[in-house]
Image (cartoon, coloured by chain):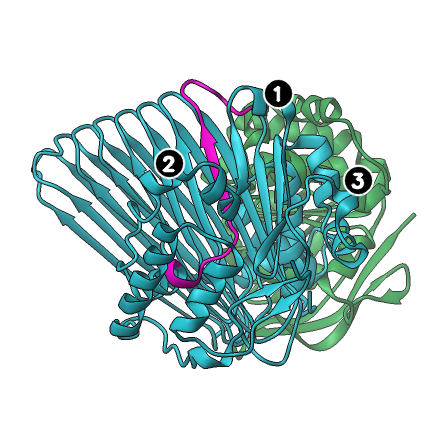
Amino acid sequence: MENKIRFEKGLNEDIVRRISNIKNEPEWMLNFRLNAYKFFKNRPMPKWGPDLNIDFNEFSYYLKETKGEANRWEDLPQDILETYKQLGIPEAEKKFLSGAEAMFESEVVYSRVRKELENLGVIFCSTDTAVKKYPDIVKEYIGKVVSPNDNKFAALNSAVWSGGSFIYVPKGVKVPMPLQAYFRINTGEMGQFERTLIVVEDGGEVEYIEGCSALMYSKASLHAAVVEVIAKKNAHVKYITLQNWTKNVYNLVTKRAFAEEGAYVEWIDANIGSKINMKYPSVYLRGKNSKAKIISVALANSGQIQDAGTKIYHLAPDTSSTVVSKSISMGGGKTTYRGLIYVKKGAKNAKSTVKCSTLLMDSISKSDTYPYTENNEETAMTTHEAYVGKINENQIYYLMSRGFSEQDATDMIVFGFINEIVNELPLEYAIEFNRLIKMDMRGAIA
Amino acid sequence: MDILNINNLSVEANGKDILRDVSLSFKTGEIHVIMGPNGSGKSTLANVIIGNPKYHIKNGNIELNGEDIATKEMNERANLGIFLAFQNPVEIEGLNIMHFLKMIYKRRFNENIPTEKIKELAKEINLQEDILNRQLNFNLSGGEKKKLEFLQMMLIKPKVQIFDEIDSGIDIDSFKRIMEIIRSIKRQTITIIITHQINTAKLIEPDRIHVLIDGKISVSGGQEILDNIDKEGYKFYGKQN
């Protein structure tokens, strides 16, 4: 097989077939794709949210740089290995991860999970590999949480998906350290469409971290992922995202989880990068006593729109959800919170708390909040707090009077504002996140 | 020894004249009290010394050891050793107090201070230890904020320490404890205490007292000033009703 493949720009049914063909997929997956492609063609662009002026024929839909999925870093081509080394992934894997995966352009180029976890039946590989090695599990769950016809970008992903993580945690297994995937776009005018599927059986636990970055090009790239999470009875899934795409990437992602009885799903979502980011990690609380926590932070600088939020469906009794959203707008950037809390009749004693706040760093930046609540159950309790404020000069002066420069004082106030959320990140990522925020506020180019 | 001189200082804020032709001189080892009725310009004076950009110097200058500091930024002045314990310190959400205290110590002395040392200092002024793990001034009581300002002063050992309404919000025992500490370190620093309370001024036992009325120093002198104000009120020194 050829090592390097780059599709010409453009999207049509033939492209969909060629992707499936390169991957040597079973027929059911080809049909899944073709079906989704029809949905994609029929669906209009979203009529709400930021103006998406995307010409789908301006991107290449498949780009492969290596022969296959390595499980030793040394087996990667030198330049690709260097990229991940600079991002500190091999180091992190040694120190504090249960497993790591690296996706480069359209394909996963590396994946490995610790032997002792493999022996317990934990699976962590690319979704492409899973289609071949674990077709029964993939077939049972793919497209069940996010239907290929859910929205235009979920349909697009379902048609042309490539790469992404497949995680399977058997009954009662608690993965001790996080699994991490790193997604990298290293070229312009390219579309990355990873598909992630996480299935955690009864009582299982896993923490998954995804990071992403891209090289800067003058022309835009498109990233449209679909993430499906199934947390079965009493399972616990913590999903952490550090999104740092360059400011010419459209990041249009559908993330959704099913939480069965007693399950706990956490989405921790940090967004610094991208041109337009639209992402609303959602949880369907399907079993009684299930819980959701959605914590997000977004920084919108000059030319950026961070359109984020969440949807929570309380479908069973005694379910609870907590949402904390913090955003920072600066240099003319715009942040939006869009949220839906739905409580089904019969979801007795459901509880939901939503808190969103925005810090405006100057008078040219913008922020909007669209919180919706639909409560059909009279024993349920939902609360919502929203706050938008401009950075307070008295706070800056106070810190300056203690010897800090204006810039350092501003950083301290911003870090304080998002601290509640950064505290949810593993220490190594919290440090990295604060460093990225600081660089961004200084106007540095990643 | 350090000398802080304020020479013919006139100050405005929001288009209003607040201080007019104020001249004062302070030396290491002295405790000065600046008194005056509400709105006489006491807090403005403190804020101008530290360089708060909300106030504009129209005339005059401020010299520390002969060097004009009036053109320096707030943080530069802080790094020269000028410190103000604010009347109402602002709240900063998410900024851990212990972390903040360690940062200001490191900034001043370029070395790390052990957590235990900070806890000991807090104990000296009856500031509860668990406060140190809270967020900077965030949801603290008035008294706790005041003590925290004082703790910062103890940590960074400024050359010039100014207290704006030193006793507001704290109980009398804590105030007396704080005064004991101020007296014990008096020899190493210039101390300027602002208050509008005559009883507070008496407890301080200052070396010099200055009365500020309508933005002007109307009198400077010793303890006798307190007796006069006690008997006659500020009108003794020219306050118009």
Q: Tell me which amino acid carries mark 2.
A: Asp
Q: Chain of mark 2?
A: A
Q: Tell me which amino acid carries mark 3.
A: Lys
For residue A397, what is the image quadrant? bottom right
Q: Chain of mark 3?
A: B
**Both on one chain, marks 3 and 2?**
no
Report if residue A171 lies within the magenta region.
yes
Residue B221 shows up from this direction = yes
Dot 3 falls on a residue whose secondary structure is loop
> Residue B82 vs residue A383: left or right?
right
Which one is in front, A177 or A301?
A177
The quarter of the image holding the C terminus of chain A is bottom right
Instruction: Name the residue rendered at 79%, 59% in the picture.
Output: A79
Q: Which chain is cyan?
A: A
Q: Chain of mark 1?
A: A
Compute the Cα span from label 3 to label 2.
70 Å
Badge number at residue B157: 3
Give the foreground label among 3 and 2: 2
